[in-house]
Image: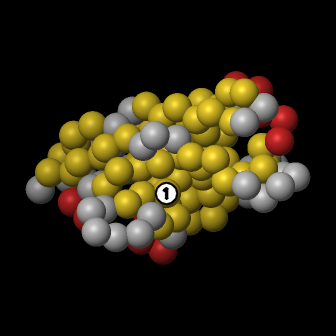
Amino acid sequence: QVQLVESGGGLVQAGGSLRLSCVASGNIFVISAMGWYRRVPGAQRDLVASITTWGTANYADSVKGRFTVSRVNANNTVYLQMNRVKPEDTAVYYCAADSRYTGARYWGQGTQVTVSS
């Protein structure tokens, strides 16, 4: 099993910045890609950004040029730097990690990000 714990959410004004962190523990050796998803009430959980073990990143069109995903494998940590945030970025953000062997996806508990206009 892999446990993921997010931190860094909160309230931020539009145009501001926020950094989310996610630390993995447990059977970390199975982890391949990691990433961030978000969900607003009544909607599905959507990909924000993902990053492979080697650092190749992928972004949703809505956050390209504003958000940056990174990871430090030695610390089992993935980050999401959120710049020039907009009210529509308001959501619960979830950290995710994929198993390289089973394809299972592990989830964190989520952290609320609220952007005020």
State the image coordinates of residue 83 (x, y, percent, origin top left).
Answer: 37, 50
Q: Quadrant of the C terminus?
A: bottom left
Can residue 68 be seen at all in this image of the molecule?
no
Residue that mark 1 sits on: 37
Position above or below: 58 against 55: below
Question: Between residues 80 and 107, which one lies in front from this camera angle?
Answer: 107
- The residue at the point 48 percent across, 74 percent down is 61
Q: Quadrant of the N terminus?
A: top right
The answer to whether residue 5 is left or right of residue 11 is right
Considering every residue shown, the one lying at the far bottom of the view is: 61
The answer to whether residue 85 is left or right of residue 61 is left
Residue flagged by tag 1: what amino acid is it? Answer: Tyr
Question: Between residues 105 and 22, which one lies in front from this camera angle?
Answer: 105
Can residue 27 be seen at all in this image of the molecule?
yes
The answer to whether residue 78 is left or right of residue 84 is right
State the image coordinates of residue 104 (x, y, percent, origin top left).
Answer: 73, 55
- The residue at the point 78 percent across, 50 percent down is 99
Position above or below: 117 against 19: below
Secondary-structure class at tag 1? strand
